[in-house]
Image (spheres, rainbow, N blue to C red):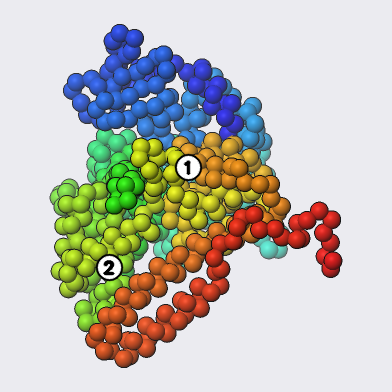
Amino acid sequence: MHRDAVAEIRERTDIVELVNAYTPLKKAGRSYKGLCPFHQEKTPSFVVFPDSQNFHCFGCGKGGDIFPFQLEVEKVDFPEALRELAKRAGIDLADTPGVSKETDERRERLLSAIDLAATFFHDQLLNQPGGTAGRELAEQRGLDRATIERFRLGFAPDRWDALLTMLWTRGFDAATLVEAGLAQERQTGGHYDRFRNRLIFPIADREGKIVGFGARALGDDQPKYLNSPQTSLFDKSSLLYALNLAKDAIKSENRAIIVEGYMDAIAAHQFGHPNVVAAMGTALTESQVGLVKRFSKRIVLALDADAAGQMATLRSLESMPNALDHVESPVPDAAGIVRFERKLDAQISILQLPVGKDPDELLRKSPEQWDSLVESAMPFLDFVIDVIARDVDLNDPRSKSAAFQRIAPLLRQVGDQVTQQHYLGRVAIRLGISEQVLWSELKRGQLRTSPHIAVSQPTRTTARRIKNEDYLTAVLLKHAALCRDFLDVISDDDLLDSRNREIVRVLRMEGADQVEPDVLLSGLDENVASHGEAILQLLDGTPSAFPGQIRQAATSALNGIRRERLEFLMRQLQLELMSAQQEEDSGVLESLTNQMANLAAQKQNFEPPKSPYFRDSRDEPGYMPGR
């Protein structure tokens, strides 16, 4: 999005009018005052300043201009806030640089085909003779008509071309239907319906636009559940079933409950629990958690109760902190440097289902248990500690060390030291290790595992610590086309800062390497965009470089990242070696020594970072191979 559009939206939008639509304001001198829309209060502390077109709440501390207000009050990301404010201001974003009108039109065409398909399936289930089998299944599962209509459930007839024929008559060509995930191409030529003889679950985005489908087979047909394929509109890992229907209840109840399957979510809504969404049978992803956090930071997971389900839940929890909101806490060190460490600002709990029951079955047979199970949900750190510690061999120091290394990153993101100390005590008891040792180990890894900015007092911008991953992300951002192949070899494990991960994720999108960095950043979350602008300044003042020099700089930074990670692992291994030496365990010593040698060999592959101004002769003007 072009920054001129952002400026024009600001110029055309009166913040007093915008805010007054959400909370009544009264004039107080040169400013306006009202109750804060972001936190509960009885005495107004929310002030709008028309001269500067800014707001500030003296209760919760939130402030800014129209964009932060829209982001917070509507719980949307930056692109959505931009679209909403542009519409309000009467600005057509399609006329601004960086926005393709053809792309928007193509997207609307696909959405139209999918919505027509949903209408067709819904009519088949409710009214047509071909939907009898679907109606029988819906009745068996206890779905009433109001629920069927609320979720727009449908049925795909047991024919190869029922949907195709209908959509062809509406002017949709086969290529569009394949692109929308509604049809598949035969190897022998022609096309056929993707969904046949299945109960259909339309899957909508947060705003209620249907972008794909889930489909349950009748009888023993396989696969039992079939989803739309990955398309430009449908990414299962970035969607939550029923979020469009649940978001208001999540906001009003200040709690989101995430279940596993479609029927679990539907049953919850039917039995009076509209704040429930479903992960659609997949492991919960960071993107999905990011969707929920916009409406509530209180998240309850109600997933499988068996051992495999608990391990899947654990893997989800271990990925959660990067997706959830954080607060920055100033932490001074002995050298007088203030480090702003990011702390987890959310409440995650695990609903303990009775073994052998899923939410759907529980809600139908024992609906009175649901509320009590939700209220007694286990805090996520208790769950993590229990699941990880239960399989630890207390006679094996490596097993105990490995367990703590899994728990430690989550402990570091706890918001206060009292709570942190409480859980550290629990871990110490479960692992049979003194709290003092665990506390020392926790702090040892603090700077390496928590993204932070180091600053000298009093300002944060004058002494920004340059990290290899910040430098690498800046190079990729500024020279996206030249360094595009680097994106294929960088993993999330290489980047500790979630803002850098988000920038790299966007750079991987098709066509991103053709967009100027400032245009690309303007479409991102404000914090991510600000971070991107800050790291780009790391490249200011560097001499002009040839392509080979730029790639050498990126390679050196990536090598530095991986070398630092290996050094960290080697330090952890050294602690285990010392313990094994004290216990004179020759077998363990031999194994650990071999592991250390392997890490050392890997470390040799990553040379210390060279100067970014290293000159590659192949970039010299007039260079030709063989000279």
Quarter of the image where one finds residue 151: top left
Q: Is residue 495 visible?
A: yes
| Image depth: mark 1 or mark 2 in front | 1
Instruction: Name which residue type carries label 2.
Output: Phe
Q: Residues within 10 Å of mark 2 (few under 14, many from 20)?
A: many
Residue 353, relative to residue 347: is it above or below? below
Which residue is located at x 28 percent, y 10 percent?
28
The quadrant of the picture occupied by the C terminus is: bottom right
Residue 31, relative to residue 237: is it above or below? above
Instruction: Name which residue type carries label 1.
Output: His
Residue 434, relative to residue 106: is it above or below? below
Q: Secondary structure at mark 1?
A: helix
Left of 216 or right of it: where is 312? left
Q: Position of residue 38 (x, y in %)?
A: 29, 30
Of the pair 327 and 621, the residue shown nearer to us: 621
Q: Position of residue 86 (x, y in %)?
A: 52, 24
Which residue is located at x 37 percent, y 83 percent?
592
In the displayed orientation, state which residue is furthest to the bottom.
Answer: 586
In three-dimensional space, the C-alpha distance between marks 1 and 2, rounded to whole angstroms, equals 31 Å
Q: Position of residue 120 (x, y in %)?
A: 51, 42
Indicate which disc, 1 or 2, sits on the residue closer to the N terminus. 2
Of the pair 105 and 442, the residue shown nearer to us: 442
Of the pair 5 and 338, the residue shown nearer to us: 338
Q: Is residue 357 visible?
A: no
The quadrant of the picture occupied by the N terminus is: top right
Which label was assigned to residue 531? 1
Which residue is located at x 53 percent, y 37 percent?
523
Residue denoted by label 2: 404
Q: Position of residue 71 (x, y in %)?
A: 41, 32
